Image: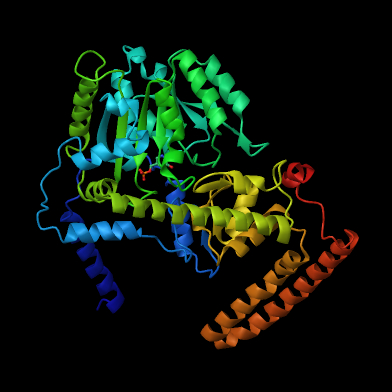
Amino acid sequence: MPSTASTARVRLDQVSNQMASSSTAPTHDVWHSTPFAPPDAIFALTAGYQQDSFDKKVNLGVGAYRDNDGKPFVLPVVRKAKQILASDDSLDHEYLPIAGLPSFVKATSKLIFGADSPAIKENRVVTIQTISGTGANHYGGAFLSRFYEPWLGKSKEEKIIYLSNPTWANHKSIFNSTGLTAADYPYYDPKTIGLDLVAFLDFLRKAPKQSVFLLHACAHNPTGVDPTRDQWKEIAQIFKEKEHFAFFDCAYQGFASGDLDNDAWAVRHFVEEAIPLLVCQSFAKNAGLYGERIGALNIVASHAGDSEGGADRIRSQLLILQRQEISNPPTFGARIVGLILSDEAMFEQWKGDIKTMAHRIIDMRKQLHELLVNKYKTPAPGPNGWEHVINQIGMFTFTGLNPDQCKAMVERGHIYMTSNGRISMAGLNEHNVEWVAECIDKAIRPYSHSESAARIVAMPAIISDTLLTTLANTFGTLAVVGIVAYQFLEINAKRLREQRDRELAASGGKGEVTPPASYEGLKAQ
Ligand SMILES: Cc1ncc(COP(=O)(O)O)c(C=O)c1O
């Protein structure tokens, strides 16, 4: 007689063979060589944050606005627009024209160039609705690749688009996928945590004539470092002299200063200076319409009409591009923004909503600065103290923290941020700013506070406490082993505490002990 176990094994094998023979998996594995792509850094960071159960965790990675309670924010004017749309029975679900919703397309170009713009008055602006700012960047790259006169007949390697170093993480990948080659131009100076204007201007002067440069119209991502108006004038002057092409990416109009016109100043100045340009727009941040994917690409032609170089010819080719890529743009976001931009009262309300967001962020900058400077007296990573926290513009601050310090922020503070030191100011609020400041302080001088030293030496006890509870609950008798472990760890903790006290005493009570080698440069500044 076979045993019950062997009968079960035979039965299991039978079932598994049956399952294998009835599988519809393709016999030729045509995806065999597909390499595993790395996860997107920002989204991986968010996933880590979501899995973290620590009560004081903070997400400063993602570039989306949050209110003072850390919640996503639906702009009141957007709520109102949605109600109006919901009660309008005349609206259907037909395809939009290929160029997009006409009321949106018309209004969005006025928003960026200004209603009095000579380019608009002379019908030289060609605008097409896009899948938010990303879609606009993609079309901008693809259009230049096909039609930018100085590149005709050139190879991908010769079609270079210069990007600020650093820039939005997606730029490189977008342009490399649209037939261009992405290269860096100097922009940010880590020593001053500010703009490296000299190197930037020098690069513009030395670049081949008619080069293409991507410029962040305002609220530079990721540094928060924008040129001043005088600096923009100098930049524009060289663009003129060298006949460079300005590829403006404007993802934060209104978000930078709280004023839509102010944030469009650089674009408008370049138009006045007759510099060839295009502008990508996004309504993700300034209207909080992240998921609706509403944006636009605007190309300024040298003249209207359908003669060579005319706006109509450009439009005709943009329509082909749109048709190939998405056929017709989506409706909902376009209706919301179209309504807000074309109704005077709603437009005013939107301006107020933008101010609410921008000023909350500006306020957070002030609070973080105040805590670092006056409460913690944290050594600053740059020569101008913590001024950069206040002076930088828009959603992001480049803190100046090095990768080790950023790692400490995540691992010890449960504060999720990218390793380049960028934090999203929108993730800060009155409930967490204190904790973030405290963690920045500790990341910069991890061993300099007696409080942080106490926290470090307390770790074994905290761990052993948790261990003990789990053991007692799960395996009653094993608790004895836990107690022994606890005692051992406590003795160890005491020894560490004493050692720390000795070090603190040796540093004259200031709590300053030799930092690890990687912090040496920071201490010197
Ligand atoms: C500089 C810059 N450009 C474009 C975008 C595109 O954003 P979206 O496609 O969500 O409009 C972003 C978003 O973070 C950005 O920071």
Please say if 297 is above or below 340: above
Ligand 1's image quarter is: top left
Above or below for 308 versus 162? above
Q: Is residue 147 left or right of residue 437?
A: left
Q: Residue at x 41, y 43 (%)?
A: 260
Can residue 149 be seen by looking at this rendering?
yes
Asked if one can make out residue 246 in the rendered structure from this viewpoint, the answer is no
**Depth check, front residue: 283 or 103:** 103
Q: Is residue 261 left or right of residue 119?
A: right
The residue located at (74%, 76%) in the rendering is 490
- Asked if residue 302 is positioned above or below residue 410 in the image, the reply reads above
Q: Quadrant of the C terminus?
A: top right
Identify the residue at image location x=24%, y=18%: 310
Q: Position of residue 83 (x, y in %)?
A: 22, 61
Q: Horizontal placement of 12 versus 92: left or right?
A: right
Q: Quadrant of residue 121?
A: top left
Report the residue at 51% width, 16% height from top. Answer: 207
Identify the image quadrant of residue 356.
bottom left
**Whole-percent x, y for residue 482 in the image:** 64, 80
In the rendered image, which quarter contains the N terminus?
A: bottom left
Q: Locate residue 423, reporting x and y percent.
A: 54, 50
Quarter where residue 28 is shown: top left
Query: In the rendering, at what x and y percent does residue 213 appear?
Result: 45, 25
